[in-house]
Image (cartoon, rainbow, N blue to C red):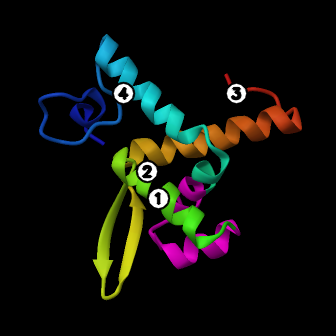
Amino acid sequence: MSPSSIQGAGSGEPSLVHPITPDPELLETAAGTLRMLAEPTRLQLLWHLSNGPKTVTELTSLSGAPRTVVSQHLAKLRLSKLVDTRKDGRHIIYSLHDGHLIRLIRETMNHADHLMTGEPAHG
């Protein structure tokens, strides 16, 4: 990984770390993302999508939630730009928008696991 991919802006490459100052608009956007994660069914759907793209049928089966509920949550996630869609024949395939979101979901679930199991915090 080149230093510019870590550093961010202006390199022309995606970056893992962005040198930013959280202004009100950025804080509201970040809070909106966290609000979308704050609902257990949506978080579960995002967790499944963190392991790769899925159809509504696959997500319904994995989550155990009714198809209408899964579809409603996916619509909210799509409008919030947290998931992307593509057509494959008659199926719509859902995927997470980017690697930042994948890492956020995985870290959120790992943090919750630590809280529940009492595993020591990482340094």
Taking depth in this image into account, of 39 and 51 the one nearest to the observer is: 39
Q: Are marks 2 and 3 in contact (CB under 8 Å)?
A: no
Residues at discs 2 and 1 in contact (Cβ within 8 Å): yes
Residue picked out by circle 1: 74
Specify which label sits upstream in the sequence, 4 or 1.
4
Within 10 Å of disc 3 (Cα), the crowding (few <14, some 14-19, many 20+) is few
Q: Is residue 15 above or below residue 58?
A: above
- Distance from the alpha carbon under mark 2 to that under mark 3: 30 Å
Q: Amino acid at mark 3?
A: His
Q: Is residue 8 above or below residue 97?
A: above
User: In which image quadrant can residue 91 be found?
Assistant: bottom left
Residue 74 x/y as whole percent: 47, 58
Give the secondary structure at mark 1. helix
In the rendered image, residue 48 lying in the magenta stretch gets the answer yes
- Circle nearer the viewer, 4 or 1: 1
What secondary structure do most residues of the magenta stretch adopt?
helix
Point out the stretch of residues depicted in magenta.
Answer: 45-64
Circle 2 residue: 77
In percent of the image, x 45 and y 35: which residue is there?
Answer: 33
- Mark 4 — residue? 29
